[in-house]
Image (tube, helix red, strand yellow):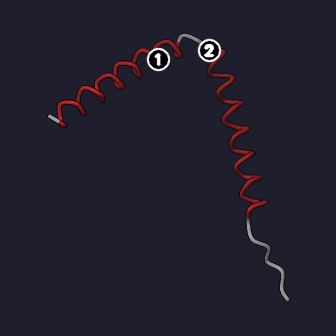
Amino acid sequence: MTALLGLAGDLVYAVAAGSIGAWLRERPAFRRRQRYATGLISLALGAAAVFAAPSRRRA
């Protein structure tokens, strides 16, 4: 019974992802914004890693 519920949930996710993917492919402006957003996220994660790194000062 649990396997059937899991299968049903996975099918819902697969159908939704396919529909959303088709909708997004029709919008080139979204792809452009996504590229900039991905770049900004990468820069932010890099900056967070730099500032979160422990200091390497010698005593």
Q: Residue 55: which quarter of the image?
A: bottom right
Mark 2 = which residue?
28
Q: Name the residue located 74 percent from the left edge and 45 percent from the top edge.
A: 43
- What quarter of the picture does the N terminus occupy? top left
**Is residue 26 shown left or right of residue 4?**
right
Q: Earlier in the sequence, mark 2 or mark 1?
A: 1
- The correct choice, above or below, for 26 with respect to 46 in the image is above
* C-alpha gap between disc 2 and disc 1: 14 Å
Q: In terms of depth relative to the viewer, which is nearer, 59 or 25? A: 59
> At which x and y percent is residue 32?
67, 22
Pick out the residue farthest to the left.
1
**Circle 1: element type:** helix
| Element class at badge 2 | helix
Residue 16 in percent (x, y) is at 39, 19
| Dots 2, 1 in contact, CB < 8 A | no
Residue placed at 66% from the left, 35% from the top? 38
Q: Which residue is label 1 attached to? A: 20
In the image: residue 53, left or right of residue 9: right
Residue at figure coordinates x 66%, y 15% from the top left: 29
In this rendering, position of residue 43 left or right of residue 25:
right
Quarter in which the C terminus is drawn = bottom right
From this view, report whether residue 27 is shown above or below residue 56.
above
Q: Residue at x 75, y 71 (%)?
A: 54
Q: In terms of depth relative to the viewer, which is nearer, 15 or 4?
A: 4
Q: Callout 1, which amino acid?
A: Ile
- How far across and how far down the image is residue 41, in percent? 69, 40
* Quarter of the rendering containing residue 52: bottom right
What is the three-letter code of the residue carrying label 2?
Pro
- Name the mark nearer the viewer: 2 or 1: 1
